[in-house]
Image (spheres, rainbow, N blue to C red):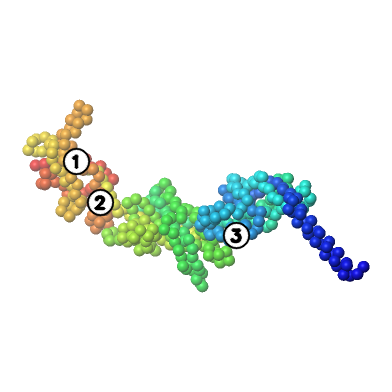
Amino acid sequence: MSNTLRGHRGRLLAAIIAALVLTLSLTGCSAVFRSSIQGRVIDLEDWDNGTTTGVEDATVFLYTDQKARDADLVAFVEGDDATRPDGSSRPERLYFQSTVTDTNGAYDFTGFIWESLFPKYGKTADRNEVFLLIYHPDYGLKPNPTPLYVVSDVTNQLDLLKIEDLWNEGRLAGTVLDWKDDKGLDGVTVNFYVAKSWTYDAGGAFADVVYPTTPSATTTTAPNGDGRWTATVRFPMKPNRTVHATHNNAPVRVAFVLNNYRANDPADGSGLSNVDLVSDVDIDRDGRTATDGDYKDAFVSATLEYDAVAGEAKIVTVPAISLQRWRFSAAVRGRTYDTSQAGYANGVKVTLGVPDLLSGTTYTAYSEKQVNGTIETDGVFDLGTIQWKMSDIEAVEATQKAGTVAIAMQGNDAALSSGNPATLSPDATLVLELVVP
């Protein structure tokens, strides 16, 4: 047989085989397989430290096609939920199924099916590679780090998926004191503004720091009278893992908030002073700083540190902060006695001025008959809550610390005969008997 004839027969046989394969595919000879998948998502750092900690509430996306998985991974932008595989900016759902991990980090897919033209084990069984993405706000979006395979008609227990979170932790501690007596101040809210991003300069110092306008975390001074506080605060592992592995730290602003108290004295001359306090930065960007009276914006800078060797947060002590009460109040009420009538009189105009009647804030009430059941009481007045500020108080430190303010009173626009005090102390209810001449 000639070589020409042999070549012709070879080409004819190849064509027949190709046609047979095409015919088989067109006539639906592929097989469909079903499987179940179980697995667990755990924290990588804890695993490296000898502890298995499941990642709860992580969303696991299951893909049958690697290109689809990779497209969703590339499209994701950290911090933008719309770019998640199931986010609003994704026009098409490229994943096959999704589920959420339980309290132990376990996940489960049932009814996973795939079609195969050439099953690995004939039409009775097949083996197929699957692809995963795992999303959690604390961990970001992560692909499965190693290849994963499932076998048909069984429950497949996949390897542990170990993912690394985006955060480290640092510990801060400090004390808040009351300016009036240097004793601990309870109930103070301590706000932490952890930098969202930053770089390091050549000397390892923070640079290009971007801070949030709202607190990243908060704590409160302990209710035991010593004004102490402690907090474990998370910070992002930025600018990247290589740099972060060397530095393991982050900048944070620490602010102290208590109603009617402040950490800086903008103009009253009371002598309040805190080391390294910053009062000219508009933290919340509302157009006012602590120097302008937005006292919650006053802060001190600190550094969050993580001990990578020990695998735990370092404790950094923030210098003690003194808060000064700058706004005060008291209640004033009583009765008016008219000497000309030899009795308690109604309709008397009572005026109180803080700190005086000319340039200060004035409060006015008229005495009247008060009826309580069958009991009638004449000459009752109530000025309500009197308020004053540190700027209203005499510039004497002892007086400022006591919060005592000068007041002036009169009845029917004239001087009272008696019963009117010269000062008012905060947090008191003053009951007076004013004598009108």
- Tell me the quarter of the image containing the N terminus: bottom right
Q: Disc 2 marks which amino acid? A: Trp
Give the labeled residue for mark 3: 71
Q: In this view, which residue lies farthest toward the top?
A: 374
Looking at the rendered image, the disc whose residue lies closer to the viewer, 1 or 3, is 3
Comparing 292 with 100, the one in front is: 100
In the figure, 164 relative to 341: above or below?
A: below
Image position of 421 (left or right of 212) = left
Give the labeled residue for mark 2: 388
Q: Earlier in the sequence, mark 1 or mark 2?
A: 2
Provide residue 313's location: percent of width, then percent of height: 54, 57
Image position of 211 (left or right of 31) = left
Q: Residue at x 81, y 59 (%)?
A: 16
Q: Earlier in the sequence, mark 1 or mark 3?
A: 3
Quadrant for residue 369, please give it: top left
Q: Residue at x 44, y 52 (%)?
A: 218
Give the labeled residue for mark 1: 432
Q: Earlier in the sequence, mark 2 or mark 3?
A: 3
Crowd rating for badge 1 (residues with CA inside 10 Å; few <14, some 14–19, many 20+): some
Image position of 243 (left or right of 377) = right
Q: Residue at x 34, y 60 (%)?
A: 287
Crowd rating for badge 2 (residues with CA inside 10 Å; few <14, some 14–19, many 20+): many
